[in-house]
Amino acid sequence: MIEKKKISRRSFVTTAAASAATLAIVPRHVLGRGFIPPSDTLNIAGIGIGGMGRTNLINLARENIVALCDVDWDYAGKAFERLNGDIEHLQARIDQPPPPDRPEPSLTSVDPAKARRQLDNMKRLYREHWPKATRYTDYREMLEKQKDIDAVVVATSDHMHAPIALAAMSLGKHVYVQKPLTWSVSEARQLAQRAKETRVATQMGNQGHSLDDARKTVEYVWAGAIGEGCHLLFPVTDGVGHRPGLARSNLIVN
């Protein structure tokens, strides 16, 4: 007769939890090249998703987009539904062969590798995340109810950037906040203090400075390729796209 082993409830729960954790953490080499294991992805919430927020979420589509929040779902919904047409347009540009008589790429040419990554992200956001993500109109309700959020993208109207970022950081959420970061110096100091207290990852949306062209310009300046000093002229507006003009900036190269 085989003696049955007695297993306590605590022992069973502990063993089951450990087994589940082992199965959830899938090594990258098991999935193969190009696949991200679930344990390496973040649960992202987007707040203000109809404009720049949509662009940010496209770039984050390899993560888990678990929640979307916007005060105007009529506008935001149409922006997301346009993704289908944007996907078709980008696919057509990728499929179009380069002109045979143009050995050098033009300013409007498409980098095939970057374009395919962008296309994959757009498809993933539109076909996987958009239908499944929980939708909210009030970021406070979202932060209160949805406990699985790791990080938040804030791309709302400017005056709400700091209040939303402060609320998210207070709950231990990492934040990516579009520019302008704050409305006042006081808000900037509050954000800096909250980031220091919570030790979460924070970043402001200055993604333009990360582009290859911007980095190349900096390298030109550092290398002295344009001399020891110059004046820069760049277009400016009143903040809402009207009354364009030129602003002058003195660039001093040490």
Image (cartoon, rainbow, N blue to C red):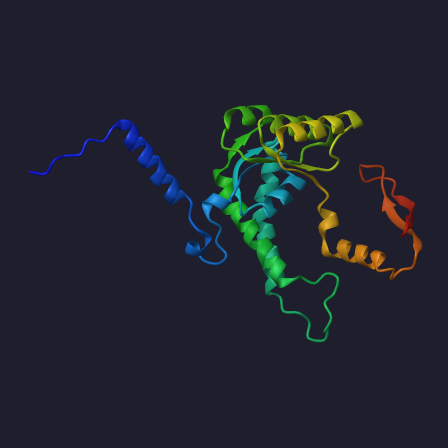
Does residue 47 sit above or below 88 in this rendering?
above
- Apparent side of residue 7 relative to residue 202 in the rendered image (left or right): left
Tell me the quarter of the picture where residue 90 sits: bottom right
Camera sees residue 71: no
Q: Nearer the viewer, residue 131 or 181?
A: 181
* Residue at 58% from the left image edge and 36% from the top image edge: 151
- Apparent side of residue 148 relative to residue 96 in the rendered image (left or right): left
Q: Position of residue 189 (x, y in %)?
A: 75, 27
The single residue placed furthest to the bottom in the displayed view is 101
Q: Position of residue 112 (x, y in %)?
A: 62, 63
Q: Nearer the viewer, residue 105 or 77?
A: 105
- Apparent side of residue 87 relative to residue 218 in the rendered image (left or right): left
Tell me the quarter of the picture where residue 193 sits: top right
* Residue at 87% from the left image edge and 43% from the top image edge: 244
Q: Position of residue 114 (x, y in %)?
A: 62, 58
* Residue at 84% from the left image edge and 39% from the top image edge: 242
Q: Position of residue 254 (x, y in %)?
A: 90, 52
